[in-house]
Image: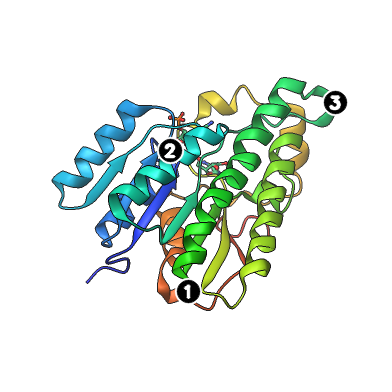
Amino acid sequence: MGRLDGKVAIITGASSGIGAGTAELFAKEGAAVVLTARRKDRLEALAEKIEKEGGRALAVAGDVREVEDVKNVVAQTMAIFGKIDILVNNAGILDKHMPAIRCPEELWNDVIATDLTGVFHYCREVLPHMVEAGKGSIVNVSSIGGIYMSAGVSYSAAKAGVNGLTRNIALQYAGTGIRCNSVNPGPTPTEANTPEKLATFDEEFREICAKHQFWAGESEVIDQAYAILFFAGDESRYVTGQWLVVDRGMNL
Ligand code: NAP
């Protein structure tokens, strides 16, 4: 018996990294998974893999910044599966550790639109279905950068916003069966976090942030996926409004 048997989950940013790892884990635990991101070929390849392994998956391409795309993902999920038990807001981009004085307007706008407004878009479209069902679990993938502010200015602001939105939604729906929590990963090797990408980050500001952290090493995608699984399933049915840090203790 799987921990998510009979549940339907939308997972954003499922074309790679933590989102793809979470989708595979959820499918193994019995959930039907709706995979969304912009790269359709990646989503379809993952959906095919999940189906071959006996799971159920639907790939729907979309951009979290575009309201019509979000509405389409939600509509297709409802048309095919008839309900949404779990929403994992995982899609996100990094901001190269840009401090305020060097952060270009365009980068600020894109990070806020993707990492914060995208989460709002999905919550706004999915919550009415959860309200009608009288239950649901939203898991937002934030970051240690949104708690300890140890990232660039736009990413820290966006992820702190995600944690604020998480608690606000938890408060609005406390006691109704609808829960909202966040997982806050520390460094985890994915396409967003490769040595080549890190080399393009603002070195000076990265060093300032690092002074306030102890380097405990990287976590793995599966560690983040297991934390997301805990909040998604009924084992955490009385847990809402919480921010769980998964960073090997590097911020203690
Ligand atoms: P990743 O492998 O680059 O995955 C990011 C995902 O987001 C991709 O599937 C990407 O797919 C999707 N995405 C980006 N912009 C999008 C948009 N506008 N619309 C729809 N989907 C979009 O990176 P990751 O590390 O797994 O990141 C997942 C989450 O973990 C992010 O929210 C990130 O901030 C958070 N996080 C990661 C780390 C880390 O060290 N890896 C640490 C803390 C927090 P497409 O390009 O196909 O759209």
Front residue (pair 116, 201): 116
Horizontal side of residue 32 vs 251, given as left or right: left
Are there few (<14), some (14-19), or many (20+) residues within 10 Å of tag 3?
Answer: few
Query: Mark 1 or mark 2, which has the lower sequence index?
Result: 2
Residue 72 — which label?
2
Label 1 or label 2, whichever lies nearer to me, is 2
Is the Cβ of the residue at disc 1 closer than 8 Å to that at disc 2? no
Up the image or down, 30 lies above or below 120; here it is below
Give the alpha-carbon distance from disc 1 to disc 2, as whole Å: 29 Å
The residue furthest right is 101
* Element assignment for label 1: helix
Q: Amino acid at mark 3?
A: Ile
Q: Position of residue 229 (x, y in %)?
A: 41, 62
Label 2 or label 3, whichever lies nearer to me, is 2
Residue that label 3 marks? 101
Q: Quadrant of the C terminus?
A: bottom right
Q: Quadrant of the N terminus?
A: bottom left
Query: Mark 2 or mark 3, which has the lower sequence index?
Result: 2
Give the alpha-carbon distance from disc 2 to disc 3, as whole Å: 38 Å
Q: Position of residue 42 (x, y in %)?
A: 32, 30
Residue 193 seen in render = no
Residue that label 1 marks? 236
The residue at label 1 has a CB less than 8 Å from ligand 1: no
Q: Residue at x 26, y 46 (%)?
A: 57
Horizontal side of residue 11 vs 141, given as left or right: left
